[in-house]
Structure formats: C-alpha cells, structure tokens
Amino acid sequence: MTQPPRVDGRTARSERTRNAIVDAHLRLIRDGDLRPTADRIAKLAGVSLRALWSHFADMESLMAASGQRVLDERDASYRQISPELPLAERIDAFCRQRARMLEEIGPAARASALKEPFSIGLQRYRRLHVARVRDELTSTFPEEIGSDEELLNALTTISLWPAWSTLREAMELPVESARAALARGIRALLGG
C-alpha cells in the first residue's frame, strides 16, 4: 500500500496563508470592493503585508491566482447537459446553468473589467472563459451547430458576461428576465 506524500508543517502553513489571501481578495470583490488594496486584503486574510508580498510578487500575480480560483469554481459548478435531450430542454438547461454561473462570476468579472486592458493574466483568463463557453455550446448543441463557425460565434457572444451584464446592469432586468432573454436569443439562433 502506497503512503501519501508527507507535507511538512511549513509547506502546509504557507499553502493556508496563500489560500487565505486569495479568499480575502475574492471576498472583498464579492462584497463590492472591485479594487481592493493589498492592505485591505492582508487585513481581511489576517496576515501581514510582508506575508502577502512574500506569497505574491505583485497584484498581477494575486489577480492571476484569484482568476484561477474563479475558473476552478466555475468548472466545479458546471454540469454537462446531455445532447440527447430534446432541443427545448437543452436550451432551458443551458440558459439556467449559464444564468447561475454568470451570477456567480459577476463580481469577479466586474473587477477584472477594470484591470483587464492592462493585465496579460486577466486577458488570458478571459480567453479561457470564452473557450469553455464555446465547448459548452458545442457539446450541448452538436447537431445544431455542426461546423457553422458563425453560429457558434453568435451563440458564444450572447452567452458571455458582457451580454449578461448589459441585461442585468444596464437594462436592470431581474435574473429570470435576463435568462428568458438569453433563451430567446439562443432559440432564435438555433431555430428551436
């Protein structure tokens, strides 16, 4: 029987501190502080500024770690939708899941939008999010999309954060109305 690798106490403490810093960063963002300072992050994490900077070389590396956490959480909450379901059921399931996931990533997406033009790391995470949505669409609607790249581009566009943000923030729609608008757009594009 193989023994699991041992983790020394110092490594475990370091990992806990790193996680506490990322947790604090994301909590501040989720609480509406879209540009949290290192000082506020360290205070909430219960660590010194020195500890924060010993784990993260700069705010860009902290944002990268936080972006990875958001991506991991998004991946953990995703549930594959069977392409065998009738089209109307797939559209409904896809839109319900997208609405839930977009609401979950909303605070991080708002904070990222402020810094993304200046952050290679955040630009990379945005591309990863786009790629995952494209994968969700092609696995949920494989027959309908086929090799139609224009259709996939249109479906991707209406399924991403900027469109959701327009519905929820600029148009001030409640979640159910925004989800219904997304579903209507997808039905129109897929002919369902």
Image (cartoon, rainbow, N blue to C red):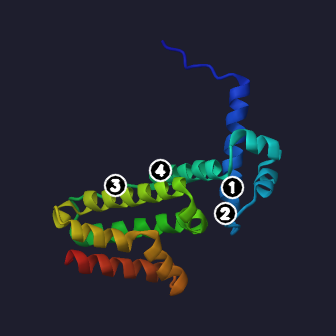
Q: Residue 98, labelled with which disc?
A: none
Type of amino acid under label 1: His
Q: Which residue is drawn at 29% across and 73% down?
A: 154
Check disc 2 and report its element: helix, strand or loop: helix
In the displayed structure, does residue 161 sit left or right of residue 158? right
Disc tally is 4
Above or below for 137 versus 6: below
Residue that label 2 marks: 29
The residues bearing labels 2 and 3 have C-alpha atoms spaced at a distance of: 28 Å
Residue that label 1 marks: 25
Q: Where is residue 109 in the image (x, y as percent from the top left)?
A: 55, 65
The residues bearing labels 3 and 4 have C-alpha atoms spaced at a distance of: 11 Å
Check disc 3 and report its element: helix, strand or loop: loop
Q: Which of marks 2 and 4 is nearer the N terminus?
A: 2
Q: Where is residue 36 in the image (x, y as percent from the top left)?
A: 72, 61
Type of amino acid under label 2: Ile
Q: Earlier in the sequence, mark 2 or mark 3?
A: 2
Above or below for 81 versus 11: below
Residue that label 3 marks: 80
Discs 2/4, front: 2
